[in-house]
Amino acid sequence: MDNKLILKLNKSFEEAAYKQNGVEYWLARDLQILLEYEEWRNFLKLSKRLLYFVKMQVKIQPIILLTSTK
């Protein structure tokens, strides 16, 4: 992947982040746009797979994954 593209994406993700009580998080609807998914249902499939992957990989430091409906 091109370094310029990586830097651009990193900046976009950092700008989309929210912080509350020292915790950084992103809203799924914002990520959908950043990752250029036009339809929510397609992005939802991806997010469910990622959620499963993260749950299986995290052993040392717990991560809180919140789900919401809009």
Image (cartoon, helix red, strand yellow):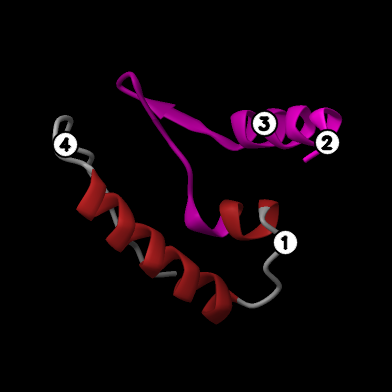
Q: Residues within 10 Å of mark 2 (few under 14, many from 20)?
A: few
Measured in 3D between alpha carbons, the distance from the residue under mark 3 to the one under mark 2, in whole angstroms, is: 12 Å
What's the mark number on residue 10? 3
> What's the CA distance linking mark 4 and mark 2?
32 Å
Q: CA distance from mark 1 to mark 3?
A: 15 Å
Percent across and percent down for residue 14 are: 61, 29
Task: For mark 4, give the secondary structure.
Answer: loop
> Would you name the residue on which mark 1 appears?
36
- Residue 23 falls in which quadrant of the image? top left
**Which is nearer the N-term, disc 3 or disc 4?**
3
Q: Is residue 29 left or right of residue 2?
A: left
What residue appears at the point 70 percent right and 28 percent down from the top-left corner? 11
**Circle 3: is it few (<14), some (14-19), or many (20+) Cα within 10 Å?**
few
In the image, is residue 28 above or below residue 11?
A: below
Magenta region, residue range: 1-29
- Residues at marks 1 and 3 touching, judged by CB atoms closer than 8 Å: no
The amino acid pointed to by label 4 is Pro
Q: Nearer the viewer, mark 2 or mark 1?
A: 2
Q: Which mark is residue 2?
A: 2
Task: Give the amino acid type for the residue marked by disc 1 in the picture.
Answer: Glu
Circle 4 residue: 62
The residue at the point 33 percent across, 18 percent down is: 22
